[in-house]
Amino acid sequence: AQSVAQPEDQVNVAEGNPLTVKCTYSVSGNPYLFWYVQYPNRGLQFLLKYITGDNLVKGSYGFEAEFNKSQTSFHLKKPSALVSDSALYFCAVREPISGNTPLVFGKGTRLSVIA
Amino acid sequence: GAVVSQHPSRVICKSGTSVKIECRSLDFQATTMFWYRQFPKQSLMLMATSNEGSKATYEQGVEKDKFLINHASLTLSTLTVTSAHPEDSSFYICSAHNGGSSYNEQFFGPGTRLTVL
């Protein structure tokens, strides 16, 4: 069965500093990996995905993530954090069996960017 | 980009009543929609997979008679919480998949916050 681990409940970073939100996954075969962001009382907003190709994926709002197959990781990164980046971040995985397989989410990591 | 709407965004009801939540794909046809629930400070848990024109597939532990799902058209799926109780209070989020390609990501609705008194 597929699973996602986000080892940190909370990440604090100063504005302007680089940020990393960690994610590791477990899935049989090649994974489809996603990052979503959720603001209070809102639905999920898609940030980026890895399907195939270049291991470094660039997404919305300056975020990027690196797929590392040997470490089964897909950490989310941003070179310079903004206060407005403060939100709840979810990593998700899906097996590419078909287009109709659901996403499996990590428990989420709350990012707090301090001015 | 693809837009998914949910209605209502927030609902408060008395214990024992039923509540219907609608999930619509506004600019694409969704053969499959997913229903998730999210408890405070927790992750999204898949409740069921809804396929247009067929019965929903429920995850283990989710009562199909309590959470009725109807996917009547390619743009609309509804979740009805029957005989709601306070423990059903949660944030319900739907997502829609816009086609047969496994490369396509799912698009999420803004969520519905249900409070059962």
Image (cartoon, coloured by chain):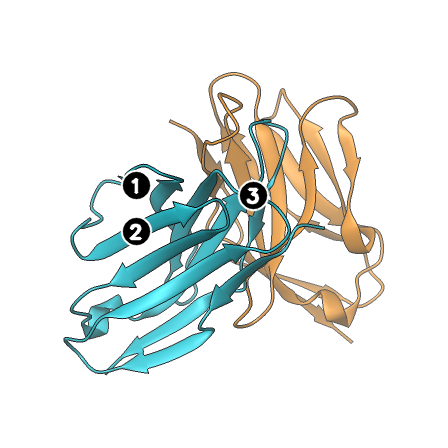
Chain colours: A orange, B cyan
- Regarding mark 2 in the picture, which secondary structure is present there? strand
Measure the alpha-carbon separation of dots 3 and 1. 17 Å
How would you rate the neighbour count of disc 2 (Cα within 10 Å): few for under 14, some for 14-19, many for 20 or more? many
The vertical placement of A9 against B17, above or below, is above
The disc, 1 or 2, on the residue closer to the chain's N-terminal end is 1
| Badge 2 vs badge 3, beta-carbon distance below 8 Å | no
Judging from the image, mark 2 belongs to the subunit labelled B
Q: Which residue is mark 2?
A: B69
Nearest the viewer among A66 and B16 is: B16
Give amino acid for label 3: Gln
Task: Where is residue B109? Give x, y as percent.
Answer: 53, 59
Judging from the image, mark 1 belongs to the subunit labelled B
Residue at coordinates 17% horizontally, 78% vertically from top-left? B15
Q: Which residue is mark 1?
A: B56
How would you rate the neighbour count of disc 3 (Cα within 10 Å): few for under 14, some for 14-19, many for 20 or more? some
Nearest the viewer among B63 and B52 is: B52
Residue at coordinates 62% horizontally, 57% vertically from top-left? A37
Measure the alpha-carbon separation of dots 1 and 2. 6 Å
| Badge 1 vs badge 2, beta-carbon distance below 8 Å | yes
Q: Quadrant of the C terminus of chain B?
A: bottom left
User: Is residue A111 visible to the viewer in this orientation of the structure?
Assistant: no
Residue at coordinates 56% horizontally, 43% vertically from top-left? B29
**In the image, are marks 1 and 2 on the same chain?**
yes
Q: Which residue is mark 3?
A: B29
Give amino acid for label 2: Ile
Task: Where is residue A103? Give x, y as percent.
Answer: 48, 39
- Regarding mark 1 in the picture, which secondary structure is present there? loop
The disc, 3 or 1, on the residue closer to the chain's N-terminal end is 3
